[in-house]
Structures are given as C-alpha cells and as structure tokens.
Image: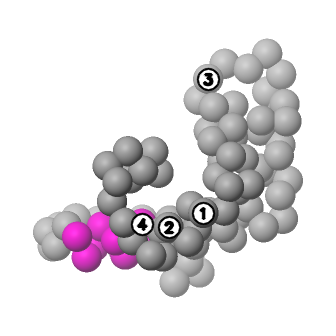
Amino acid sequence: MEGYLDLGVRDAEIDTHLDDAAHLQKLRRFRNATFHYQEDPFSDKYTDFKLDPSGELWVLKLNAAFRSFFERELPDHHLSTYLRQLSPVGAE
C-alpha cells in the first residue's frame, strides 16, 4: 500500500479501499504491532484490526484489487500465474 501511494499510481478499485481511512489506519498499526517488538503483544495496535468484524473482508478485497492491478499492469505470464496461486479462497 505504501509503495502504491508513494508512486502516485491510480486505480479506481484500489483507491476506493484505500480511501477507507479507518481500516487503513488499523492495518498500519496492525502491521507495526506484528513486525516491530511490542511489550504487550496484544496491544490495541494488534487487536483493533483483528477484532474489527469488517477488517478481514476489507483486506481480502484490497488484496484482490492489488492482484487485478498487478496482473493488468505487469502482464508477465509467470507473475500472473504466481499471483493467482496466492489468491485467498473466496476473494474473487
């Protein structure tokens, strides 16, 4: 997400999901809690996203939007095949 935003790339489907500031902020905090040492491993940074009933669906839709974007913009057959293998069940 950060690379996409830093590059200034535009995609309507991705942008719709990234316009959801609440989910975006929760996901950033979750990522920080996951990949950076936290004295409390179950701090609000972690649980705010994990316990959000709409968070999982939001991130699955965002992932699907990124996959579609990369398949369209990077038409390398091997990359497309690889990305399809990573697709979560039910994200289509």
Q: Secondary structure at mark 3?
A: loop
Tell me residue 66's x, y (percent): 42, 66
User: Which labelled disc corresponds to residue 36?
Assistant: 3
Tag 4 near tag 3, CB within 8 Å: no
The three-letter code of the residue at mark 1 reads: Asp
Tell me residue 49's x, y (percent): 77, 50
Q: Which residue is mark 2?
A: 15
The three-letter code of the residue at mark 2 reads: Asp
Q: Considering only vertical position in the picture, is 76 above or below 9? A: below
Tag 1 near tag 2, CB within 8 Å: yes
What residue range appears in magenta? 65-73
Quarter occupied by residue 21: bottom right
Tag 4 near tag 2, CB within 8 Å: no
Tag 3 near tag 1, CB within 8 Å: no
For marks 3 and 1 on the same chain, the one whose residue lies earlier in the sequence: 1
Q: Which residue is more in the foreground, 33 or 22? A: 22
Q: In the rendered view, does 11 fall on the left or right side of 39?
A: left
Q: Secondary structure at mark 1?
A: loop
Residue 71 colored magenta?
yes
Q: Secondary structure at mark 2?
A: helix
